[in-house]
Amino acid sequence: FISWRAFDNSALFEKLLNNPYTIKHRKQYYRLFSHALIHADWMHLLLNVYVFYSFGMVMEQVFKSMWGNTQGGIFFLALYIGGALVAALPSQRKHGDNFGYNSVGASGAVSAVLMSYMVLFPTQQVLFFFAIPMPSFVAVLIFFGLEYFMNRSGKTGIAHDAHIWGALFGIIFLLIVKPAAIINFFVQVG
Protein backbone atom coordinates (compact mmCIF):
# COMPACT_ATOMS: atom_id res chain seq x y z
CA PHE A 1 0.00 0.00 0.00
CA ILE A 2 2.79 2.42 0.89
CA SER A 3 4.65 1.67 -2.36
CA TRP A 4 1.49 2.26 -4.33
CA ARG A 5 0.95 5.59 -2.56
CA ALA A 6 4.60 6.60 -3.08
CA PHE A 7 4.41 5.92 -6.84
CA ASP A 8 2.22 9.01 -7.16
CA ASN A 9 3.59 11.00 -4.23
CA SER A 10 7.21 12.04 -4.79
CA ALA A 11 7.40 13.76 -1.39
CA LEU A 12 6.47 10.52 0.38
CA PHE A 13 8.91 8.56 -1.82
CA GLU A 14 11.75 11.00 -1.02
CA LYS A 15 10.96 10.92 2.70
CA LEU A 16 11.16 7.10 2.90
CA LEU A 17 14.02 6.15 0.56
CA ASN A 18 17.41 5.03 1.78
CA ASN A 19 19.74 8.02 1.42
CA PRO A 20 22.87 7.22 3.46
CA TYR A 21 23.98 10.87 3.44
CA THR A 22 20.72 12.00 5.04
CA ILE A 23 20.90 9.17 7.57
CA LYS A 24 24.44 10.08 8.56
CA HIS A 25 24.29 13.87 8.47
CA ARG A 26 20.66 14.52 9.43
CA LYS A 27 20.25 11.52 11.76
CA GLN A 28 17.16 10.20 9.94
CA TYR A 29 17.75 6.63 11.09
CA TYR A 30 14.19 5.55 10.27
CA ARG A 31 15.30 5.40 6.61
CA LEU A 32 17.30 2.27 7.43
CA PHE A 33 13.90 0.56 7.63
CA SER A 34 11.51 2.75 5.64
CA HIS A 35 13.28 2.07 2.34
CA ALA A 36 11.78 -1.43 2.49
CA LEU A 37 8.28 0.05 2.31
CA ILE A 38 8.71 1.59 -1.15
CA HIS A 39 9.83 0.31 -4.54
CA ALA A 40 11.16 1.76 -7.77
CA ASP A 41 8.24 0.60 -9.90
CA TRP A 42 5.43 -1.96 -10.15
CA MET A 43 7.73 -4.73 -11.45
CA HIS A 44 10.07 -4.26 -8.48
CA LEU A 45 7.16 -4.32 -6.05
CA LEU A 46 5.45 -7.34 -7.63
CA LEU A 47 8.66 -9.36 -7.77
CA ASN A 48 9.34 -8.74 -4.08
CA VAL A 49 5.74 -9.52 -3.15
CA TYR A 50 5.77 -12.75 -5.18
CA VAL A 51 9.04 -14.04 -3.69
CA PHE A 52 8.03 -12.97 -0.18
CA TYR A 53 4.64 -14.65 -0.49
CA SER A 54 6.10 -17.83 -2.02
CA PHE A 55 8.71 -18.41 0.66
CA GLY A 56 7.51 -16.26 3.54
CA MET A 57 4.31 -18.23 4.08
CA VAL A 58 6.33 -21.39 4.65
CA MET A 59 8.89 -19.73 6.92
CA GLU A 60 6.19 -18.07 9.00
CA GLN A 61 4.52 -21.45 9.51
CA VAL A 62 7.86 -23.08 10.38
CA PHE A 63 8.51 -20.45 13.05
CA LYS A 64 4.97 -20.70 14.40
CA SER A 65 5.21 -24.50 14.60
CA MET A 66 8.49 -24.17 16.53
CA TRP A 67 7.44 -21.47 19.03
CA GLY A 68 3.69 -21.00 18.77
CA ASN A 69 1.73 -18.34 16.92
CA THR A 70 2.76 -15.25 18.84
CA GLN A 71 6.44 -15.98 19.42
CA GLY A 72 6.81 -17.57 15.97
CA GLY A 73 5.28 -14.46 14.41
CA ILE A 74 7.73 -12.28 16.33
CA PHE A 75 10.67 -14.39 15.13
CA PHE A 76 9.42 -14.15 11.54
CA LEU A 77 9.03 -10.38 11.84
CA ALA A 78 12.56 -10.16 13.31
CA LEU A 79 13.89 -12.11 10.31
CA TYR A 80 12.23 -9.71 7.88
CA ILE A 81 13.00 -6.44 9.66
CA GLY A 82 16.54 -7.57 10.49
CA GLY A 83 17.09 -8.42 6.83
CA ALA A 84 15.94 -4.94 5.80
CA LEU A 85 18.29 -3.28 8.31
CA VAL A 86 21.34 -5.41 7.57
CA ALA A 87 20.78 -4.96 3.82
CA ALA A 88 20.98 -1.18 4.24
CA LEU A 89 24.24 -1.15 6.22
CA PRO A 90 26.73 -1.68 3.34
CA SER A 91 25.37 1.33 1.45
CA GLN A 92 25.48 3.35 4.66
CA ARG A 93 29.16 2.57 5.04
CA LYS A 94 30.03 3.17 1.38
CA HIS A 95 27.79 6.14 0.61
CA GLY A 96 27.42 8.02 3.90
CA ASP A 97 29.00 11.11 2.33
CA ASN A 98 27.41 10.74 -1.12
CA PHE A 99 24.27 12.87 -1.23
CA GLY A 100 23.28 11.46 -4.63
CA TYR A 101 23.05 7.78 -3.63
CA ASN A 102 19.56 6.42 -3.02
CA SER A 103 18.06 2.95 -2.82
CA VAL A 104 14.59 1.56 -2.27
CA GLY A 105 12.89 -1.78 -1.92
CA ALA A 106 12.42 -4.77 0.33
CA SER A 107 14.80 -6.99 -1.61
CA GLY A 108 17.25 -7.35 1.27
CA ALA A 109 14.48 -8.37 3.67
CA VAL A 110 13.00 -10.71 1.06
CA SER A 111 16.47 -12.20 0.45
CA ALA A 112 16.70 -12.96 4.18
CA VAL A 113 13.42 -14.87 4.07
CA LEU A 114 14.37 -16.62 0.81
CA MET A 115 17.78 -17.77 2.06
CA SER A 116 16.45 -19.02 5.39
CA TYR A 117 13.96 -21.12 3.42
CA MET A 118 16.66 -22.48 1.09
CA VAL A 119 18.92 -23.47 3.97
CA LEU A 120 16.05 -25.11 5.85
CA PHE A 121 14.81 -26.94 2.72
CA PRO A 122 17.96 -27.49 0.61
CA THR A 123 16.59 -30.29 -1.58
CA GLN A 124 13.25 -28.61 -2.31
CA GLN A 125 12.89 -27.75 -5.99
CA VAL A 126 12.71 -24.04 -6.78
CA LEU A 127 12.35 -22.25 -10.11
CA PHE A 128 15.34 -20.02 -10.66
CA PHE A 129 14.33 -17.00 -12.74
CA PHE A 130 10.81 -18.52 -12.66
CA ALA A 131 11.82 -21.10 -15.27
CA ILE A 132 14.84 -23.24 -14.34
CA PRO A 133 14.07 -26.00 -11.81
CA MET A 134 16.83 -26.85 -9.35
CA PRO A 135 17.32 -27.87 -5.74
CA SER A 136 17.45 -24.97 -3.29
CA PHE A 137 21.08 -25.61 -2.33
CA VAL A 138 22.13 -25.14 -5.97
CA ALA A 139 20.04 -21.96 -6.17
CA VAL A 140 21.86 -20.66 -3.05
CA LEU A 141 25.22 -21.01 -4.80
CA ILE A 142 23.97 -19.44 -8.02
CA PHE A 143 22.26 -16.61 -6.11
CA PHE A 144 25.44 -15.63 -4.28
CA GLY A 145 27.58 -16.05 -7.38
CA LEU A 146 25.36 -13.89 -9.58
CA GLU A 147 24.85 -11.23 -6.92
CA TYR A 148 28.60 -11.06 -6.25
CA PHE A 149 29.51 -10.61 -9.93
CA MET A 150 26.70 -8.14 -10.60
CA ASN A 151 27.71 -6.17 -7.51
CA ARG A 152 31.32 -6.07 -8.71
CA SER A 153 30.30 -4.79 -12.14
CA GLY A 154 28.36 -1.93 -10.52
CA LYS A 155 26.50 -1.21 -13.73
CA THR A 156 23.03 -2.59 -13.01
CA GLY A 157 21.56 0.24 -10.92
CA ILE A 158 20.55 -2.39 -8.36
CA ALA A 159 21.92 -2.60 -4.81
CA HIS A 160 23.23 -6.16 -5.13
CA ASP A 161 25.14 -5.76 -1.88
CA ALA A 162 21.76 -5.35 -0.16
CA HIS A 163 20.66 -8.71 -1.60
CA ILE A 164 23.90 -10.37 -0.45
CA TRP A 165 23.83 -8.97 3.09
CA GLY A 166 20.11 -9.58 3.49
CA ALA A 167 20.61 -13.20 2.39
CA LEU A 168 23.57 -13.66 4.75
CA PHE A 169 21.48 -12.27 7.58
CA GLY A 170 18.73 -14.80 6.77
CA ILE A 171 21.19 -17.68 6.99
CA ILE A 172 22.80 -16.45 10.22
CA PHE A 173 19.42 -15.69 11.80
CA LEU A 174 18.20 -19.21 11.00
CA LEU A 175 21.36 -20.76 12.44
CA ILE A 176 20.93 -18.76 15.66
CA VAL A 177 17.26 -19.64 16.19
CA LYS A 178 17.55 -23.20 14.85
CA PRO A 179 21.19 -24.36 15.13
CA ALA A 180 20.35 -27.87 13.89
CA ALA A 181 19.49 -26.33 10.50
CA ILE A 182 23.14 -26.41 9.40
CA ILE A 183 23.46 -30.11 10.22
CA ASN A 184 20.14 -30.77 8.53
CA PHE A 185 21.35 -28.83 5.46
CA PHE A 186 24.47 -30.97 5.01
CA VAL A 187 22.64 -34.21 5.78
CA GLN A 188 19.97 -33.48 3.16
CA VAL A 189 22.45 -32.28 0.55
CA GLY A 190 24.75 -35.24 1.22
Image (tube, grey):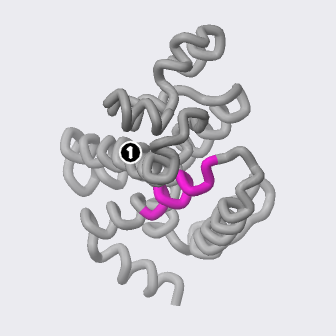
Q: Which residues are magenta?
A: 159-168
Can you give x and y, in whole percent of width and height, for residue 176 in the image? 26, 66
Query: Residue drawn at (25%, 63%), measured in percent from left and top?
Result: 177
| Vertical order, 190 against 95 (above or below) | below
Q: Secondary structure at mark 1?
A: helix
Q: Main secondary structure of the magenta part?
A: helix
Kind of residue at disc 1: Leu
Q: Which sits in the foreground, 144 or 24? A: 24
The residue carrying mark 1 is 85
Seen in the picture, residue 138 relative to 76 is either above or below; the reply is below
Q: Is residue 70 left or right of residue 7?
A: left
Q: Is residue 75 above or below residue 150?
A: above
| Mark 1 nearby-residue class (10 Å; few <14, some 14–19, many ≥20) | many
Query: Percent x, y for residue 104?
Result: 56, 34
Q: Is residue 85 found inside the magenta-colored segment of the image? A: no
Residue 105 seen anywhere in this rendered image of the structure? no
Query: Could you tell me residue 160's position as x and y percent?
Result: 62, 54
Image spot of residue 114 (x, y percent): 52, 55
Depicted 140 relative to depicted 43: above or below:
below
Q: Nearer the viewer, residue 84 or 185?
A: 84
Left or right: 55 in relation to 28: right
Residue drawn at (56%, 44%), measured in percent from left and top?
Answer: 107
Q: Is 27 displayed left or right of 68 in the figure? A: right
Asked whether residue 71 appears in the rendered view, the answer is yes
- The residue lying furthest to the bottom in this view is 190
Judge by depth and name the residue closer to the eye, 43 or 186: 43
Q: How many marks?
A: 1
